[in-house]
Image (cartoon, helix red, strand yellow):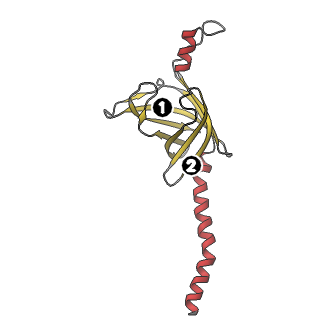
Amino acid sequence: MQRAALLVFVGVLCLPCHLRAQTDQSKSIPQAMFGMWKLVSYVREDLPSGAKSDVMGSHPSGYINYDRDGRMIVIIVGSHRTRPVGEIATPDEAEALIKSMVAYAGTYTIDSEAKAVTHHIEISWDQSRTGTDQVRSYKLEGNHLTLTTEPSTDPATGRKTVRTLIWER
């Protein structure tokens, strides 16, 4: 009886340490994601063919930021953008600039067990994304963050694809 009581007592004492260790571990993954990341590559894989191609040219530019307050913002521009000839872009120039950009902001949540981050889009360059949740699987390796979309319709091609973005600090 005393042994059972001792085991229960030790178990109760250790429970907060165990729970704190789980909490610290789940917080450590989002902690590593905080801050600004610079885009390295943006590739699409066509489904079901498996063909891969650059989404916005071979050297797109972009940044993604995950803030500690649960807010995020991303902007990506293609590698072959052309500056308008005049001070004000012509309608064709403006259309080309809009088509070579992705930008949105909102909040985010992280599911560290599923290794997924969900972007809850509140404002977007493409109004069809505003109010949606965009789920990305993530992988953190050193100073690189890889985000991969779920299979979905590519807004640029209309085909079913998976898009992978690699970011670095």
Which residue is painted at 61% across and 10% down in the image? 89
Q: Residue beneath label 2, please?
A: 110
Mark 2: amino acid: Ile
Mark 2 or mark 1: whose residue is earlier in sequence: 1
* Residue in the picture at 33% in, 34% down: 50
Determine whether 124 is above or below 96 in the image: below
Q: Where's residue 158, x and y in %? A: 41, 26
Which quadrant of the structure image shows residue 72? top right
Could one spot residue 23 in this view of the protein?
Answer: yes
Q: Residues within 10 Å of mark 2 (few under 14, many from 20)?
A: many
Q: Does residue 74 appear anywhere in the picture?
A: no
Locate residue 25, reporting x and y percent: 58, 59
Q: Mark 1 points at which residue?
A: 42
Q: Are marks 2 and 1 in contact (CB under 8 Å)?
A: no
Rendered position, 6 above or below 116: below
In front of the other: 57 or 120:
120
Work out whether 31 lies above or below 35. below
The amino acid pointed to by label 1 is Tyr
Q: Could you give the CA–CA distance between mark 2 and mark 1, rounded to whole angstroms?
A: 21 Å
Q: How many marks?
A: 2
Q: Where is residue 149 in the image (x, y as percent from the top left)?
A: 46, 38
Quadrant position of the N terminus in the picture? bottom right
Q: Residues within 10 Å of mark 1 (few under 14, many from 20)?
A: many
Instruction: Provide the secondary structure element on which disc 2 rests.
Output: strand
> Which mark's residue is nearer the viewer, 2 or 1?
2
Q: Quadrant of residue 11?
A: bottom right
Q: In this view, does 98 lie to the left or right of 150?
A: right
Q: What element carries label 1?
A: strand
The foreground one among 41 and 112 is: 112
- Residue occupying the far right of the picture: 69
Residue under the image location 48 percent in, 24 percent down: 56
Which residue occupies the foreground of this view, 131 or 91? 131
